Amino acid sequence: MNDIPFIKMHGLENDYLFLDAFQRPKIASDLSTDRIAAMCNRRRGVGADGVIILAPPTDSAAGASMRIFNADGAEAEMCGNGARCAVRLLTDRNHVTQRDFTLETRSGALVVSITESALVTLDMGEPRLDLPAIPVDPTALSAPPERINLDASRITVGHYPGVPVSTGNPHFVIPWPEPLEPVPLESFAPALQNAPAFPGKVNIHLLHPRVADAAQMRSYERGVGETRACGTGACAALVAGVALGMLSRRATISMPGGDLHIHWSEDDNHLRQTGPAEYVFEGVWNH
């Protein structure tokens, strides 16, 4: 079995193993679902929330492409924290020489930029609030959708009312009136994310707004479980908070791993997230 060199990075403690297909174009052929899961195992492997492959773009106008695999080996559409790390790695290794470029993902192209302080900004595009696009199956809901402002749908799944949003990945944001630390998220999130209402499964987030421009969030992600941070989820949380009249369009979302600064522009309807990207270590997987 071929060795797999990797670089471990994290964005707000949401950690990924990066594989460089610029240097080894066929590195993806060394992977399998089982091997990804073994690498990500936190007791017997390297330990990570997923694996990301960086490669040359398919579109010559883009700077690079990335594929994202969750810790269970299933391929995901997007990852905000992973994308920020990807941007820093690509520029540090001179695979991309521009400070602003386009990054191809399974959910579409991202316009990205990196500052001298290594903070990375991602233009996440427009959020999707229409149920079929998220996707949500209205016929499987516990109660009919209740239309609220900004064309969002507040829906009830099981006993939990929330706002479904797609920001590249499907999310279900549940407003929570109390501080989040004591909440036993693992006691209900797995069943909720696998509910029939979510045919592609969904990431579950609890949102506790503190003031109009600051909120607390916890996340339970598909194929991973509870994570320390979720970049696309923080964007979805802001959208849900604005739709529910709880947050302004520019706010700091605080997660166990740290803070992301999110802006939902009224000018172009695009979401932008800004946050750090950090190196952990490099190694070789040979199992």
Image: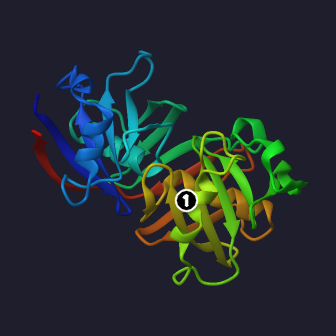
Q: Position of residue 250 (x, y in %)?
A: 65, 62
Q: Residue at x 24, y 36 (%)?
A: 19
Please tell me in which quadrant of the rendered image residue 10 appears: bottom left
Is residue 37 shown above or below 146? Answer: above
Please tell me in which quadrant of the rendered image residue 198 appears: top right
Say left or right for 59 vs 214: left
Inspect this view and state whether residue 262 appears: no
Say left or right for 286 vs 146: left
Q: Callout 1: few (<14), some (14-19), or many (20+) C-alpha neighbours within 10 Å?
A: many
Please tell me in which quadrant of the rendered image residue 96 appears: top left
Say left or right for 198 vs 115: right
* Count of numbered circles on the image: 1
Residue under label 1, please give it.
190
Looking at the figure, which quarter contains the N terminus? Answer: top left
Inspect this view and state whether residue 7 appears: yes
Q: Residue at x 56, y 55 (%)?
A: 233
Q: Position of residue 124 (x, y in %)?
A: 57, 43
Tell me the SS state at disc 1: helix
Is residue 215 shown above or below 229? Answer: below
Task: Identify which amino acid the numbered label 1 is placed on.
Answer: Pro
